Amino acid sequence: MTLNFMRFRAVARKEFLHVIRDPRSLGLAIALPMFMMLLFGYALSLDVDRVGLLVYDRCGTPRSRELLSKFNSSRYFKLVRQISTDAEIGQAFDRNEAMIALSIPVTFDRDLGAGRPVTVQIIADGSDANTATIALGYGEAIIAGFSGEITLERIRRQGRRPPETPVEVRPRAWYNPDMESRLFIIPGVMAVVLMIIAGLLTPLSVAREWETGTMEQLISTPVSPAELVLGKLAPYFSIGMFDVLLTLFAGQYLFDVPMRGSPVLLLATAAVYLSAGLGLGMVLSIVTRNQLLASQAAMVSTFLPAMMLSGFISPISQMPDPVQVITRLFPARYFVTVLKGIQLKGLGFTGLHAEIGFLLLFAGVLIVAAISAFRKNLE
């Protein structure tokens, strides 16, 4: 594989001019990362809080209102209104006014005063199973805490000493102490953004030459396949790395995403990942020779896997075993791991060498495949 710097620079300059003269594509490549960062940062949240709550309090005593105050003081629930019939629960669920309903029996205060167990019902709208499961857990924890307070109060009234808890739990979350979902989501945005660059812009480079008829002129020049492919990738690589800096800046200063590891290692790994995506886009552009077909194929093979199969939103460990195997075929899986490892955990090359090695392998294979797929003929 020969590479003449002068010819490479000429091809790269020609492609830069194409990009600059297409302000819509250039604007999309620069504005889209910020739009996605703002969209995912502010609109997408996996946190379950301020869940709409209905209360059917048949008892209406200070003790039942005390239980209700436990829910009101929690950030996980927001009281929508108090209801007076069971039928209102279904009506509110149908209108998406609330997701949880708390039903307190009429004998609540009397049974507690007599030392008898009381059953309090929590009804959830199971159409959103994930949110309902988490909200039910929060509700059960609040009621368990309320029940524990009543038990301690009874023991003190009897003049006894409260028993010591045999096992004390002290939970602690590393890397994300406040358990904020944006720290889980924002680092992965970069992986999606770079695949969009590869999926939208790169496939147009060679396919556009074939459709406009200028490929014949390039073929007649001494430019080698390596010089042509690498020269055409140069402007998109530059745009992609600019987007990397843009998303890092926005993540740190808009969403307080930390940078606990080496920024140099992250940028170097991003360059390798971007090269893999651009190489795949170039292969599709060379093989299809059609801008529309190349773009559609690139979006299916780059953007969708980066969204769905990378661990960006849904943890890979929660996916079915066959799907977990399929995720190993896409570079985004490894890059998202690197991003979270560097930014949140402060890992270095030693802790991420396997993922970086796979990215290097993907980048090398796809760039070589693009160069090999290009043939200087009109067939």
Image: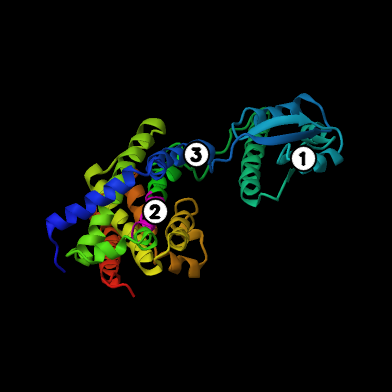
Residue 202 sits inside the magenta stretch: yes
Q: Is residue 370 above or below residue 308?
A: below
Which numbered marker is on residue 95?
1
Q: Which quadrant of the figure has residue 183?
A: top left
Q: How much space separates mark 2 and mark 3, taking CA atoms?
A: 17 Å
Where's the N terminus, which quadrant? bottom left
- 110 is higher (above) or lower (below) than 286: above
Give the residues in magenta: 194-206
Q: What residue appears at the point 75 percent right and 38 percent down from the top-left corner?
A: 102
- Work out whether residue 347 or residue 213 is closer to the camera in this orientation and state it: 213
Q: Amino acid at mark 2?
A: Met
Whichever of callouts 2 and 3 sits on the residue coming sooner in the sequence is: 3
Q: Is residue 283 magenta?
A: no
Please state which amino acid type lies under the numbered disc 1.
Answer: Arg
Give the CA separation, mark 2 to mark 1. 38 Å
Q: Position of residue 99 (x, y in %)?
A: 70, 41
Q: Earlier in the sequence, mark 2 or mark 1?
A: 1
Mark 3 lies on a secondary structure that is: helix
Q: Which mark is residue 39?
A: 3
- 318 up-or-down from 47: above or below: below
Residue placed at 28% from the left, 46% from the top?
Answer: 17
What colour scheme governs how the chains and residues are painted in the rendered image of this protein?
rainbow
Q: Residue at x 38, y 46 (%)?
A: 190
Cα–Cα span, label 3 and label 1? 26 Å
**Label 1, residues with CA under 10 Å away: few <14, some 14-19, many ≥20:** few
**Residue 112 x/y as whole percent:** 77, 34
In which image quadrant can residue 177 be found?
top left
What residue did someone put label 2 on?
195
Query: Image height check: is 304 above or below 322?
Result: above
Residue 194: x %, y % from top left: 37, 50
Mark 2 vs mark 1: in front = 2
